[in-house]
């Protein structure tokens, strides 16, 4: 049997997130985007409201939301602003490798700390020379007595210059490709770590995107997450779980674009009538609605399957690729419906278009999702 009804708890959660978005995010979105202001104040309020660290289990003091419930919240937060929501959501990405492969001690220390007071963490895999091609990473590690020593650099890391701790990935031998990669967790204030915020993003500008350099960073053996050489596997398992939530980012941005268009098209007059009367404009909005419905179905299905402990047929990649690409088209059409005003910063839709572009890039580009899907199709 298939059911599409949200239960009472899910409705309440969605309402809470919608109210938070309206009251705390939307009023700040434009200014924070323009000035690249990190939304610390919003994150503090989100922490108090239980709208951060969604996946941290209840036994560690977190909300312990399923991926599906997380998607419902993320959708509403991103309706308000994808940049501010990125700052709120990055903790969950970093929490996943620990939930997948961390020891009880690592979970207690790092995930437990997230729930005591507002702190941040970051998932750092991308490097200047290796993004899509994760297995080519240059950041290396070697064993030295009871320690590991890491050298290298990561960039484009969400909350990278803010994080209190990092989950990162390094290779013992680049020649081993994905089999050489291990995963580590450690505090961000250790000697040998320098970091800075990267500026000048096109969209999601309130979010902190950081660069981190590891210069003879020495960490204890207990910083290893899971088993040596299995880091690539944990990273891919992380993305399987996180991609439905990224698809939910796309749903939130797209829904906002449609709502803005519905409002504007009934007010803007051309040729003596509201532009909503023109079939060309109606069809663009109808296509937006069709796509948003399809995005939701795919997102919820992927999230639900992941929650059941399955991710067949690379379903998370379907949701992420379809959602990101549809969102880009929807927000571009929204600018079109607003005409010249759509191109100006005084109106909300140019920001939606800029924010949408990033969804096609992070957590694996739209092309990489298709690589994953095609590989799965061909091996069946
Ligand atoms: C704002 C922001 C936040 C981010 N947050 C994080 C984060 O928190 N943690 C983290 O680790 N990373 C993060 N990233 C990095 C992001 O995941 C990478 O940018 C992304 O995976 C693409 O890597 P790249 O930029 O090196 O592009 P490249 O890998 O150089 O790709 C360039 C182009 O080539 C295409 N391409 C590459 N390989 C193939 C192929 N095999 N087949 C077809 N096309 C291909 C790509 O699709 C793309 O169009 C973030 C990035 C940004 C911009």
Image: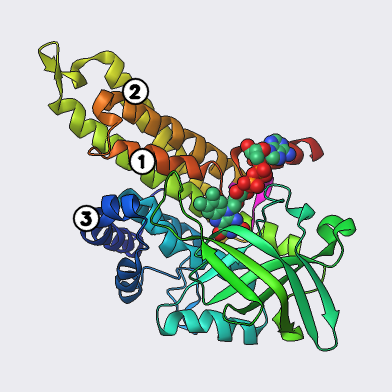
- CA separation in Å, label 1 and label 3: 15 Å
Q: What stretch is highlighted in magenta?
A: 310-316
Q: Position of residue 102 (x, y in %)?
A: 67, 77
Task: Pick out the residue farthest to the right.
Answer: 175
Residue 352: mark: 1
Instruction: Tell me, yes or no, if residue 367 can be seen here.
Output: no
Left or right of 114, for residue 152: right
Tell me if the residue at label 1 has its CB under 8 Å from ligand 1. Answer: no
Q: Position of residue 106 (x, y in %)?
A: 63, 83
Q: Camera-side residue: 297 or 233?
A: 233
Secondary structure category for the residue under label 1: helix
Secondary structure category for the residue under label 2: helix
In the image, what residue occupies the spot 47% across and 54% down?
Answer: 199
In the image, what residue occupies the spot 76% across and 57% down?
Answer: 137
Mark 1 or mark 3: whose residue is earlier in sequence: 3
Residue 284: mark: 2
Residue 3: mark: none
Q: Do the residues labelled 1 and 3 touch (CB within 8 Å)?
A: no
Q: Is residue 81 above or below residue 49?
A: above
Mark 3 or mark 2: whose residue is earlier in sequence: 3
- CA separation in Å, label 1 and label 2: 16 Å
**What secondary structure predominates along the stretch shown in magenta?**
helix
Left or right of 172, for residue 298: left
In the rendered image, the quadrant that contains the C terminus is: top right
In the image, what residue occupies the spot 49% across and 44% down?
Answer: 358
Secondary structure category for the residue under label 3: helix
């Amino acid at each position: 049997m298939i059911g599409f009804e949200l239960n009472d708890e899910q409705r309440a959660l969605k309402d809470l997130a919608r109210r938070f978005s309206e009251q705390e995010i939307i009023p700040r979105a434009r200014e924070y985007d323009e000035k690249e202001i990190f939304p610390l104040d919003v994150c503090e309020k989100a922490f108090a409201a239980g709208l951060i660290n969604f996946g941290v289990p209840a036994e560690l003091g977190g909300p312990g939301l399923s991926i599906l419930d997380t998607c419902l919240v993320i959708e509403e937060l991103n309706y308000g602003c994808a940049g501010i929501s990125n700052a709120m959501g990055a903790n969950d990405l970093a929490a996943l490798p620990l939930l997948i492969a961390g020891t009880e001690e690592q979970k207690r220390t790092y995930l437990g700390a997230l729930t005591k007071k507002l702190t941040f963490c970051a998932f750092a895999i991308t490097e200047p020379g290796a993004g899509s091609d994760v297995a080519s990473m240059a950041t290396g590690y070697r064993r030295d007595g009871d320690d590991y020593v890491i050298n290298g650099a990561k960039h484009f890391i969400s909350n990278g210059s803010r994080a209190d701790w990092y989950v990162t990935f390094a290779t013992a031998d680049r020649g081993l490709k994905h089999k050489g990669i291990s995963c580590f967790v450690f505090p961000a204030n250790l000697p040998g770590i320098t970091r800075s915020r990267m500026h000048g993003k096109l969209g999601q500008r309130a979010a902190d995107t950081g660069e981190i350099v590891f210069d003879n960073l020495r960490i204890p053996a207990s910083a290893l997450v899971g088993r040596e050489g299995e880091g690539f596997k944990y990273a891919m398992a992380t993305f399987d779980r996180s991609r439905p939530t990224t698809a939910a980012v796309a749903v939130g941005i797209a829904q906002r674009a449609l709502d803005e268009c519905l409002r504007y098209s009934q007010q803007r007059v051309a040729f003596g009538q509201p532009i909503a009367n023109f079939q060309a404009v109606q069809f663009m909005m109808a296509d937006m609605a069709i796509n948003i419905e399809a995005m939701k179905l795919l997102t919820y299905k992927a999230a639900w399957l992941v929650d059941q402990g399955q991710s067949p047929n690379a379903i998370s990649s379907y949701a992420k690729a379809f959602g990101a690409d549809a969102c880009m088209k929807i927000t571009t059409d929204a600018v079109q419906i607003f005409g010249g005003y759509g191109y100006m910063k005084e109106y909300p839709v140019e920001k939606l278009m800029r924010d949408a572009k990033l969804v096609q890039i992070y957590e694996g580009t739209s092309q990489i999702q298709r690589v994953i899907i095609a590989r799965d199709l061909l091996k069946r």
